Amino acid sequence: MRRFASDRDFRAGFVAMLPACIGIAPFGLVCGVGAAAAGASALGALGLSAIVFSGAAQILAVQLLAAGSPLAVIVLTCFVAGLRFLIYSAAMAPYLRPLPARWQNGLAFLLTDQAFAASVRRFDAGGDPRGGGLFFFGGGFALWTSWQVTNVVGYFLGNLIPAGWSLDFAVPLCFIALVAPHFRSYPTITAALVAAFAVIAFAGLPMKLNLIVAGVIGIAAGTLADFARERWIPR
Amino acid sequence: MDTTLKLWAVIVIVGTLNYLSRLSFIALFADRHVPALLGRAFRYVPAAMLTALVVPMVVALPLGPIGPSAPKIAAALVAGVVAFVSHSQLKTLGSGMVTLWALEALAQRFG
C-alpha cells in the first residue's frame, strides 16, 4: 500500500473522491443502521458492506432480510438492482483494456456509481492508461475505506442519530444525484417516468417485487422510445 | 433458514454476482460483441432502476393520501433540479435535506 500512497495519480484519485465520500457518508450510516435493525451480527454487517460494496444492494438486502423474504427473492432483487454495473463495466472496459489482467480484476471490484463517474472524466481527459488505472484505484480505495467506516459507525451508533434528522432521506438523494443529470434525452426520461409509474402501480406485489417489475418495464420503455426517436425524428 | 446463515448466503451470492457484473465487459466478455438490442437496452438500466428505487423512498406506498409524503416529494424535486444543473452530489444532498427539514418544521408549526 505504501508504494501507492506516494504515487501522484493514486493520490489525485484519492483526493478527487473525498467529496463523494462525504456525500455517501449518510447513506453508509443508514446501511449500518439497517443491518443492525435486520438482526445482523457485527461481522455479518461488515461482510455485507466489504464484499457486496453496493449501497442499493445492501439496503434492499437488509430490508428484505428483516421482512423474512426468501433467499431467492433477495438475491434476484439485489442482482437486478446491480445490473447497472454491466453498463459501467462496458463503459470502463476500453480504458482498462491496456492494463494487465491482474489490474482489471482488482479494479473491477472497486467499480461503483461514484468511481465510474469520477474516473470516466479522468480517462477522457487523456494521459497514460497506467495513470488512469492508479487514479481509479485511489478513488476506489478512498470510497471503499470510507464506506466501511460509515457502515460500522451506523451499525454501532446509528441509534444515537435523532429520528428528526430524517437521515434515511439521504439514500434517495444519493440516487437522485446519480440519475437526474442523465435526464437529457427523451428515451432516458421515458425510462424513468415509466419506471416511476410502474413501481407505484405494482406496489401491491409482495416482497418488493414491484422494484424488479418497474425496472424491467422502464428499461423496455426507454428502449422502445429510443427506437421510436430513431424512426420518426430525423437527425 | 436462520437470519445469520441467510445473511452470509446473501453476502456470498450477491457479492459474487455483483463482482461478475462489474467484471463482465472489462474481462469476461472483453472480446465479445454486444448484440445491438442489448446494448441499446443497457443504456436505460440506470435511469429505470435508480428511479424505481427512489420513488418508494419518497412516496409512501401503496399510494394513499399524498399529504404526509408532500415534504419528501418537494425535497426530492428540488434535489433533482439541483442535481440536473450542478452535477454535484454534495449540493444535491444538502439542498434536499435542507428543503425537507424546512418543510417538516413548517408542517409541524402550521400543520
Image: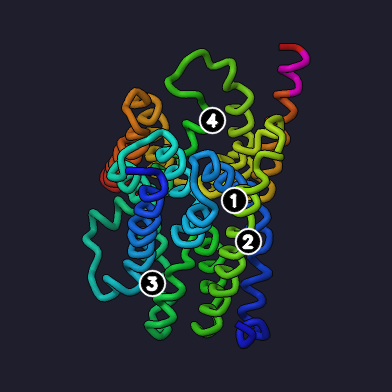
Quadrant of the drawing holding the N terminus of chain A: bottom right
Q: Quadrant of residue A3?
A: bottom right
Crowd rating for badge 4 (residues with CA inside 10 Å; few <14, some 14–19, many 20+): many
Circles 2 and 3, Cβ within 8 Å, touching? The answer is no
Q: On the picture, is A3 further left or further right than A75? A: right
Give the residue pinned by disc 3.
Answer: A93
- Which of pointers 3 and 1 indicates the residue nearer the eye? 1
Q: Do circles 2 and 1 both sit on a common chain?
A: yes
Looking at the image, which residue is at 57% across and 48% down? A32
Magenta residue span: B105-109
* Separation of residues labelled 4 and 2 (CA atoms): 26 Å
Callout 2: SS: helix
Tell me the residue that label 2 is attached to: A146
Q: Secondary structure at mark 3?
A: helix
Left or right relative to A231: residue B70: right
Looking at the magenta stretch, what is its main secondary structure? helix
Q: Which residue is mark 4?
A: B58
